Amino acid sequence: MKTIYLIGLLSFYLSLPLAAQDILSALVPLSHDVALGRQVSSQVEKDPSIKILSEKDYPKAYEYLRNITKNILESGQVKNAKNFPWEVKIIHDDKTLNAFCTPGGFIYVYTGLIKYLDSEDHLAGVMGHEIAHADQRHSTKQMLESQGVQMLSEMVLGKNQNAIANIAKNLLSLKFSRDDETSADKASVNYLCATIYQSDGAAGFFEKLLKQGQGSGTPAFLSTHPAPANRVATIRADAARRQCKSQTVRRANTYQQLKDSLPK
Ligand SMILES: [Zn+2]
């Protein structure tokens, strides 16, 4: 009965001109995001094709990324800063220029992305973008739309390992809607605006991709993040409009130290 009621409720909500965000908050509690994220992250870590960099062997790199995460969370602009655990893991894969974040804030950054970028601001911009996807619950919304409430609840309880494994796999190539991408870009500027970072950090990454291509790396981020040229202009305009008081220091030295601390 409960299932039928929920499905009925869902179609009722879907028939109303409500924002997707409202439907989501009405049907799925935030704790579901965390439970789902935990399930997905344990799948990611079980995947033999994904090599998580050991924190014991690379404490400096982890400290560096945690510090960026902390600075973003302390901007006061991340809505779910206190609701999600915001854990960071580094994936050892120099050929992939990517980062992703599960629902509930389990962040993954590839060594390929860290090595490709030139400054902490740019990495903070990309991480801000990924944090925004979780903060704004974009993948939870997608899962609700594609799987429905019932399946989502089963996954939260760990009952449907196949579906979770699929989602873990898809997260690596998950496509968000254009609106969600624009919204995550905007949020990245907004978060960074209240930190020590240059608020248009994410644009730095897209700009480098446009200028230099992706080198030997796979275009993972580009396939999930289209139209880099438009995005550079939009992010820059947004940052200028906000008149953020970010520092202009690029902290190039410490960023190089981060790169040097990674496995060669
Ligand atoms: Zn994105």
Image (tube, rainbow, N blue to C red):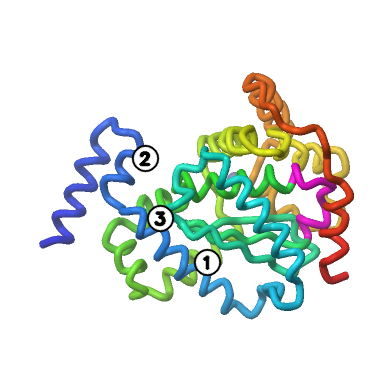
Where, by quadrant of the figure, is residue 23 drawn?
A: top left
Residue 16 at x, y percent in the picture: 24, 33
Which residue is labeled 1 in the image? Answer: 168
Residue at 23% from the left image edge and 47% from the top image edge: 10
Q: What stretch is highlighted in magenta?
A: 112-122
The quadrant in which the N terminus is found is bottom left
Numbered disc 2: secondary structure: helix
Q: Earlier in the sequence, mark 2 or mark 3?
A: 2
Instruction: In the rendered view, tell whether residue 241 sits above or below residue 205.
Output: above
Camera-nearest label, 1 or 2:
2
Horizontal side of residue 109 vs 5, given as left or right: right
Q: What residue type is labelled 3?
A: Met
Q: Which amino acid does label 2 sit on?
A: Gln
Mark sitting on residue 48: none
**Quarter holding ligand 1:** top right
Numbered disc 1: secondary structure: helix
Numbered disc 3: secondary structure: helix
The quadrant in which the C terminus is found is bottom right
Residue 37 at x, y percent in the picture: 46, 63
Which residue is labeled 2 in the image? Answer: 21
Residue at 57% from the left image edge and 79% from the top image edge: 46
> Per the image, is 118 magenta?
yes
